[in-house]
Amino acid sequence: MLKTLILGLGRIASLLERDPKRYHPCTHAGVLLNSKLKKYFKVEGIFDPNLERILQFQKDWNLNPKKLKTNLRDISKESWDFVVIASSSEAHLENLNFAIDLKIPFILCEKPICQNLKQLKSIQKKLNSGNHVVWVNHERRYHPIYQFVKKNLLTNQWGDLKTIHASVLTSSRDPGIGFTKRGGGPLLHDGTHAIDFLDYLFEKVPKIKYSKAFQLPNNKTESRVISLLEYSKEIQVFLEAGGQREYFLFEIDIQTTKGRFILSNDGHKFFLAKESSLYTGFKSLQAISLPKISVLNPWLLLYQEIIDFSLKKSNSILGDLSANIRILQTIEKIYKKAGFQL
């Protein structure tokens, strides 16, 4: 059983578990305290700079305050096996340094791991000097449908990959304003999920052929970025992160020589080319059924990987530091091509 500390008690740590429309668990607390995997973890420390969140967390999960460490002084005196960093993005660097200084061997950090590449490389040096293993919660790497798509693309089951349209859009009138004081805008904080999936597919930093950032008056961050990424001469990716829409959308639209495959928060859709019922001598895209997979919750698969690693049943990490270095390199190249300075 891993003695566990949670740093940051907001939405992704706990509060989203209240949403009845989501699959569950959909938060760190949901896995650690209310799933079939909870037997592997013993949550003995929680912290948030907002005292009300500490009290609410204890109430929501029916935890005994007397058995919890809830301030940094007491937490620092303890030895921990595992820490979840679910704080705000701008606090990730501070909390990573805190975890490293406490010599916590297993670290799970929310995305983005840092606000820029310089911060990440400073953390990498400290991690290399100690005995630490780090996971970053880009959850789609652990989603079986996304894994199924990667496998079929790599084995050319659906023909040659040609084009990808990646969209991470928000209904916010000004999606940059929420990040003005946090460093980095929608591309870094939300678009990182799309960049991560592209890195999961290609495991390389692309050429940035075109990029443009849109910025509203009085904003320090962008409100929207569009970019053309080239992973090879044959594979182009059109990326948009930001929004100013009246809807929320995460969508990866993949087009190959034989089909089209849409991965989306609104549902996944698969199409393959078959003889057209409308035009003689032509093929058209027709919907096909998705594979039947017993476990579709990426949270459970991410945490299962951490458990297996801690028990020395596996040494596999899907989203390791090298992947996150490439992700931040890609994001910074997109900003630079757009002439946008953070």
Image (cartoon, grey):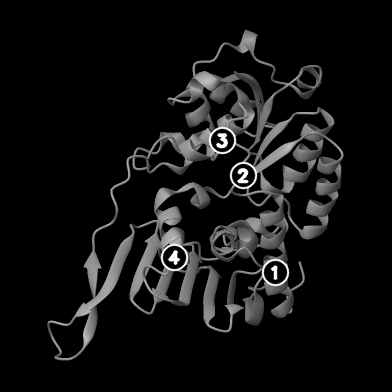
Mark 3 residue element: loop
Q: Position of residue 76 (x, y in %)?
A: 80, 22
Q: Residues within 10 Å of mark 1 (few under 14, many from 20)?
A: few
Q: Note whether 15 is above or below 193 in the view shown.
A: above
Question: Image point 64% across, 76% down: which residue?
Answer: 213
Mark 1 residue element: loop
The residue that disc 1 covers is: 218
Q: Which mark is residue 235?
A: none
Q: Identify the image quadrant of the N terminus.
A: top right
| Distance between mark 4 and mark 1 Cα atoms | 48 Å
The residue that disc 3 covers is: 13
The residue that disc 4 covers is: 155
Q: Classify residue 295 as left or right of residue 241.
A: left
Q: Amino acid at mark 3?
A: Ala
Q: Residues within 10 Å of mark 3 (few under 14, many from 20)?
A: many
Lower sequence index among marks 4 and 1? 4
Question: Image point 61% across, 26% down: which residue?
Answer: 311
Q: Note whether 165 is above or below 176 in the view shown.
A: below
Q: Amino acid at mark 4?
A: Thr
Q: Position of residue 198 (x, y in %)?
A: 55, 65
| Distance between mark 3 and mark 2 Cα atoms | 21 Å
Question: In this rendering, does residue 201 appear at all?
Answer: yes
Q: Note whether 172 is above or below 24 in the view shown.
A: below
